[in-house]
Amino acid sequence: MTTMSDMTLWPFFFEGQDGQPGAPHGIADERVAELRKHIGDDLPVGLEASVRSSFDDGLKGVLSTSIGDVVAGGWNHYRELRKSRDPKKHAPEEIVSVPVGKHSISSSHHPRLEMTLNGAPLGPPVVFDIELQLNITAATLKMQGGEIREIRPGSCKGTGTLRWGKALLAKRQTRTVTLPGVITLNQST
């Protein structure tokens, strides 16, 4: 089972109802058209499939951001967290609990994917626009040394869109999910 701490944006947008991944359809067509401009219509056997596969792998790479990191990043702007980060009030080893009531976190991301053929760019970089809105009922954050170290979440409902230029590649709305146990963050947020 995928939890919020290890779920990335890829399954958020493309995991099917049955839990199986569902890749976007036709997303690599423009890259294949660029390849045809460079090589011509006589593509070597398997090259078109290789480009499509590489594009899908690259998309998975740019969508490897953890949902937990998105949430933690949103909380970094929360006023109560700024207070808990004050080194005059809290020693670096002190653990501070910060309750967070019902709230929303909005997040925008603009990852880029560049494909190359023999080291040369295969068309301009592809820039994706990701918009996320997470509605969280409650959570408790454990702070130490001015950093979020642990999240004890309540429940969450999210929406998100993934665009490539004007094309809507994916739109997702989750059901309300009771978030599991504890999310431990090992790195600075």
Image: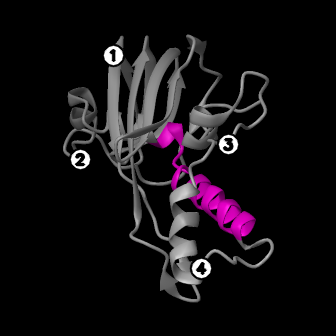
Predominant SS of the magenta segment:
helix
Q: Nearer the viewer, mark 1 or mark 3?
A: 3
Q: Quadrant of residue 159?
A: top left
For the record, the magenta segment spans 48-69
Q: Amino acid at mark 2?
A: Pro
SS class, disc 3: loop
Element on which disc 1 rests: strand
Q: Is residue 161 left or right of residue 64?
A: left
Q: Quadrant of residue 28?
A: bottom right
The disc label shown at residue 23, or none: 3
> Residue at coordinates 62% horizontally, 41% vertically from top-left?
24
86 vs 106, nearest the viewer: 106
Dot 2 or dot 3: first in sequence order is 3
Q: Is residue 101 visible?
A: no
Query: Mark 1 highlights which residue?
Result: 103
Q: Nearer the viewer, mark 2 or mark 1?
A: 1
Q: Which residue is mark 4?
A: 40
Q: Residues within 10 Å of mark 1 (few under 14, many from 20)?
A: few
- Residue designated by label 2: 87
Q: Is residue 85 above or below residue 182?
A: below
